[in-house]
């Protein structure tokens, strides 16, 4: 039995600046959820330590989590539990004899990698997909728990607002990059991919992203120049770090299935969309280019409307690589079969799909289990379609969600609660990534 050295630090491949999830205490957890320790060749000792530490862990389980959940919780210790486990460890250690102190440390990093409960990003890596979160600038500036969780669990970041037009170019030709830059710096430091969101979002249903000078452009030619200039500036700045762009966001009516007649489309016709895709392809040929749409995740009129639009755009020359299914499930989540059917339609058209803004509000207070099942279903649907290679959540803690103001804080739509405790939704996503039902 090869083990993790007690005296080692976290293996280099696991070192995550800013947060190590208690992995440096000299013990870790096997895939079956049992904790195990670090001493080479002392299996009996290990077994006793194992039971004692598991026991102390279970004693700290006032919320009655299932054994399966506890497997994961072993990785997400509160410092109080960590301290208790450490003291249990030390006491046991002395009763079993100080001879262990002189035992050499073994090199068990490979075993560590295969036996530890894995983070979402590690599991997603194993499945060949990205697991992402939308990120707000202020949370990465001041909230250490946010930083730790984001770094440990997610392999991709979408700037929630910082890369949008109103944030980066509020006046024509006058750029404010600080917030987007700080998110890019974070993602780079933690080896996370970046989804460029979003170059042009003309739909003004609930939020307005195109600045007034665009809507008030004196003529069509000037409006088109504003769009061209904006795309060029943002893509040139971030093309080295962004690997996929939401070139156009929500071209359709939010609650309909026709092209949205916002001021840009009403002025320029849908040709501006084709031109935007062509421009980004020219500037950043290696990036994947997406059209990102809301409420089109299940079969029905909006899905059909989007298929029709995209076919038209492609035949007019738009180099579209994929469709972003936002997946804000405000009206209830679709079934696995519905999502798979939609994804297969896009696959048939030769396009990738990505789940780009997933959140699932509780529709009744206390609906945590139903919410968890829905989250697991989305992951299972994506994993069952070859061309779905990304699941991005619109945030990960209920502490920060746009739905706290849009629907109210009782909607609790995300994977972690306000105090960063993983919810059933987290475990469901984890299990679905592992491949368990
Ligand atoms: C849309 C946008 C996102 C975000 C959400 C609401 O889905 O694509 O950028 O603004 O609305 O927060």
Image: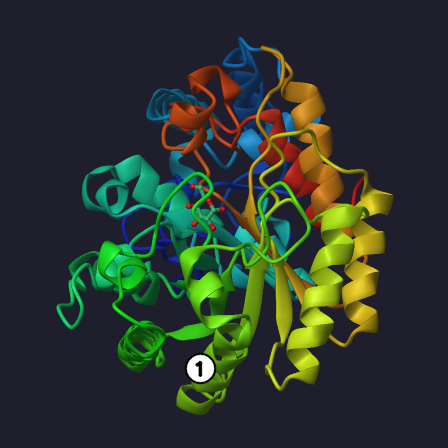
Camera-nearest residue between 86 and 380: 380
Q: Is residue 291 left or right of residue 233?
A: right
Give the residue drawn at x 68%, y 50%.
257
Label total for image: 1
Q: Is residue 394 above or below residue 108?
A: above
Q: Is residue 290 left or right of residue 27?
A: right
Q: Position of residue 407 (x, y in %)?
A: 47, 22
Any part of residue 163 in sight: no
Any part of residue 42 in sight: yes
Camera-nearest residue between 9 and 211: 211
Q: Position of residue 291 (x, y in %)?
A: 57, 65
- Circle 1 packing at 10 Å, graded few (<14), some (14-19), many (20+), is many
The residue labelled by disc 1 is: 280
Give the residue drawn at x 78%, y 56%.
304
Q: How is the image coloured?
A: rainbow
Q: Position of residue 403 (x, y in %)?
A: 45, 29
């Amino acid at each position: 039995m090869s083990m993790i050295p007690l005296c080692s630090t976290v293996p280099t491949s696991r070192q995550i600046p800013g947060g190590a999830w208690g992995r440096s205490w000299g013990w870790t957890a096997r895939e079956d959820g049992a904790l195990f320790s670090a001493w080479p060749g002392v299996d009996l000792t290990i077994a006793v330590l194992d039971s004692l530490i598991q026991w102390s862990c279970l004693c700290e389980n006032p919320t009655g989590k299932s054994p399966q959940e506890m497997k994961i919780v072993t990785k997400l210790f509160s410092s109080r539990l960590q301290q208790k486990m450490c003291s249990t460890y030390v006491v046991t250690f002395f009763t079993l004899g100080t001879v262990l102190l002189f035992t050499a440390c073994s090199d068990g990093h490979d075993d560590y990698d295969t036996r530890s409960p894995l983070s979402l990003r590690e599991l997603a890596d194993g499945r060949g997909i990205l697991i992402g979160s939308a990120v707000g600038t202020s949370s990465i500036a001041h909230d250490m728990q946010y930083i730790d969780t984001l770094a440990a669990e997610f392999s991709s970041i979408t700037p929630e607002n910082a890369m949008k037009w109103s944030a980066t170019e509020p006046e024509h030709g006058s750029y404010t990059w600080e917030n987007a830059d700080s998110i890019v710096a974070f993602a780079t430091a933690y080896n996370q991919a970046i989804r460029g969101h979003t170059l042009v979002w003309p739909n003004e249903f609930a939020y307005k992203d195109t600045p007034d000078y665009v809507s008030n452009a004196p003529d069509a030619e000037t409006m088109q120049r504003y769009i061209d200039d904006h795309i060029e500036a943002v893509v040139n700045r971030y093309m080295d770090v962004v690997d996929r762009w939401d070139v156009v966001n929500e071209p359709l009516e939010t609650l309909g299935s026709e092209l949205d007649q916002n001021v840009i489309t009403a002025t320029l016709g849908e040709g501006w969309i084709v031109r935007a895709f062509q421009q980004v392809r020219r500037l950043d040929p290696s990036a994947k280019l997406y059209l990102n749409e809301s409420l089109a995740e299940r079969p029905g009129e909006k899905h059909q409307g989007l298929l029709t639009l995209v076919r038209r755009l492609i035949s007019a020359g738009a180099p579209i690589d994929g469709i972003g299914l936002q997946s804000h499930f405000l009206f209830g989540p679709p079934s696995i079969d519905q999502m798979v059917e939609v994804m297969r339609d896009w696959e048939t058209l030769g396009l990738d799909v990505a789940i780009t803004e997933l959140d699932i509000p509780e529709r009744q207070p206390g609906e945590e289990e139903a919410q968890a099942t829905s989250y697991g279903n989305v992951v299972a649907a994506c994993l069952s379609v070859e061309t779905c290679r990304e699941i991005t959540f619109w945030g990960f803690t209920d502490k920060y969600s746009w739905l706290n103001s849009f629907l109210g804080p009782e909607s609790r739509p995300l994977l972690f609660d306000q105090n960063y405790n993983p919810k059933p939704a987290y475990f469901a996503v984890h299990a679905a990534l592992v491949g368990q039902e």
